Amino acid sequence: MPKVTIDGISIEVPEGTSILNAARMIGGEIVPPAMCYYSKLETSGGYCRTCMVKVVKGSEKDPRPMPKLVASCRQPVMDGMEVQNITSPDVIEARAGVVEFLLMNHPLDCPICDQAGECNLQDLGYEHGKEGTRYEFKRREFEKRDIGDKIQLHMTRCILCYRCVKVADQLCPSRVHGVMNRGDVAEISTYIEKAIDNEMSGNMIDVCPVGALTDKTFRFKSRVWFTKPVEAHRNCTKCSGKVRLWFKGEEVLRVTGRKDEWGEVKEFICNECRYDKKNVSDWVIEQPTHVDRHSVISQNHYENLKQMKLDTQRLKAKLPENKTNGSK
Amino acid sequence: MGRQLLINDLDKEGIATLAGYKANGGYAALEKALKMKPEEVVTEVQKSGLRGRGGAGFPTGMKWSFIAKPPGVPRYLVCNADESEPGTFKDRYLMQRKPHILIEGMIISSFALGANTSYIYIRGEMMYVFHILEKAIQEAYDAGLLGKNILGSGYDLDLYVHCGAGAYICGEETGLIESLEGKRGNPRIKPPFPAVKGVWQCPTVVNNVETLAAVVPIINMTGDEYAKIGIGKSTGTKLISASGHINKPGVYEIELGVPVEEFIYSEQYCGGIRNGKKLKAVVAGGSSVPILPAEKLLKTPKGEPRLMSYESLSEGGFAEGTMLGSGGFIVMDEDTSVVKNLWNFTRFYHHESCGQCSPCREGTGWMEKILHKFLDGHATMADIDLLWDIQSKIDGRTICPLGDAASWPVASAIRHFRSEFEEYVKKGENMRDIQHYYRVNQLEATNS
């Protein structure tokens, strides 16, 4: 098995693993961000350039460094390869440049965007971007469009990651969804205003890293951080039926696929589960979803309260005994 | 006049037809090649030292030897006739006047590579050339030069011309392959390279028109003889499309190694600068190579005269040199505005970017807008540094070389002509709508 060293940490990975996946196996800070790569979709990745890393040693056989930064999501590891991610100032600078490019024509309408709070671009900008922009021209705009009766396309927010195109290509037979035009006026679109009529099409919403494709049954209902995610399942003939329900009070506001720690859907779900089953009685509730404490969704989340409880207990233990006794 | 191997007999009558081409020694190389073994043809091309004429200058024989040969999988040869680099028009010239040399070169090359199906991918704007090629291919089929059992050798080849829709990005080999397959012309991510997985996921070689045409004289005169022409590793002849402020613009075939000064000023080539003006700058190999000011173009950093060859033009790296590229030689006289010219180039790259990867998609448009600000007279000194910073963030960060091609002209123009950018900033709105530099100077003369 090839051995790769990323930021000084070595790991042995199966043949053909990409640098990004090797980094994900190590985990932690050294994992490059990915806006377009999606492990469940074939041929995805390579477009956004945020996952670029520096290869300082090609392999054991050919130790020459690679002349350019490489997209880690599409570059397979070689035995003895040495990669720099957060330890290379070049990579950090290049990534900041990419963030600037991605945000250049982005409307930054987070206050009214449904994706805010679970947006990959927000996270990317926060973690890898620089303050302010040097772009002073008019930003690119598109008309809002419906693709199908359940999905709204807000092309202005799109970063052209091609994930939805790959979903249409690989999950939906007879695809009618693709990219039109080129350059900075390229847009994702359907074939001559044709609605996407396929039972797996809703997954486009889940794979979209920004607020370009949103669920029309959830639009403007609630900010995501006011909803509480819960894992649930049902017997579904079309998909695995394993979903995540987003509650506000007793009401299910939306249904999405379950996402893993890299923001990727674990199993794609069908449109029936997504749009038509919004009663609690349709579902078998499993457990509350673990929400990373860095996520804004974790605010007011009971897991945090539990965490706080633990802390108070620790605090109590630290206090002098007479005081705790005294409070009794 | 040096030796001409490709366009030597264009004045002969009927050279565009099969009969005329055969009367002038055409298809002799094919007969010779079909008697050889395919590997011997590859060896011959390797010996000749022929380098790709499309821009990158990669040794053709080496490229052919890289092609994967899994059993039972067909191999393909694709001719890249999507010539759309601003300043380059040599392939169109050759195909239009002598289509059979390309067809002959393609049959020999396909034979060498073991391909039974080959494609010519031609740019959509060149529809009339498409018709010329279609006609020539039909002639070749009728004469038994294409199809089953070519000239009784037992070798079969089908040749198709495919017309693109006129996108610069489809001149990039993987973008071309995607387009040929009927998809959106987005370049693929490499690896895998086309030599392993190309058209229909089969091993493919993509070569430029001129490269494939040059195979014909190589077989005719043997690779060793061909290698004697030229200088050093730049062997053979090269078509140069000379344009701009020269007395005799046009397509010239030169032996590689002609001094640049001789090429610009001698009567047999460009014939000097128009109206007796002085030379200001030259873009030596099509719009994507770095622009060079006259003094750096004519002399290498070592003080020797610069020659028209791959090595000599790139001597001094990107700071002091440029590239031979595809041979689009654009000459600018002293009245030309480098900033305006750069804006035009950048506008082209902005328009032609496929929009796949973010640095090129967003960066090219941004650079164009900033350059437009210069022309409008609203730019500030900080914009020059900003422009430099943007190009440095595109260069080498994209999937295909279009990003590099968009950033190199900007980098070189700022590097060599920074004062001119500053002048645009200082003079502000006076520069607006002024096409040429000299009008500003005239304006100043009348004002003072």
Image: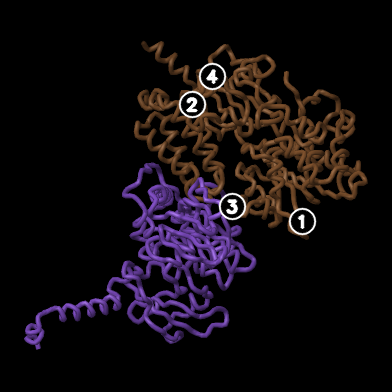
Chain colours: A purple, B brown
Q: Is residue B124 visible?
A: no
Identify whether A80 is placed above or below B48. Answer: below
In the picture of the structure, the residue carrying the numbered disc 3 is B190
Q: Position of residue B90 (x, y in %)?
A: 69, 31
The type of residue carrying mark 3 is Lys
Q: Secondary structure at mark 3?
A: loop
Q: Is residue A268 left or right of residue A135?
A: right
Indicate which disc residue B287 carries.
none
Which numbered tag is attached to residue B74? 1
Please name the residue shown 54% across and 41% down the image: B351
Q: Quadrant of the C terminus of chain A?
A: bottom left
Is residue B170 left or right of B228 when viewed as pictured? left
Q: Which residue is mark 4?
A: B333
> Mark 4, mark 1: which one is toward the viewer?
1
Mark in the foreground, 3 or 4: 3
| Labels 3 and 1 touching (C-beta < 8 A) | no
Same chain letter for marks 2 and 4: yes
Q: Chain of mark 2?
A: B
Residue at the spot 38% in from the left edge and 55% down from the top edge: A86
| Disc 1 crowd, CA 10 A, few/some/many (<14, 14-19, 20+) | some
Q: Amino acid at mark 4?
A: Asp
Disc 4 crowd, CA 10 A, few/some/many (<14, 14-19, 20+): many
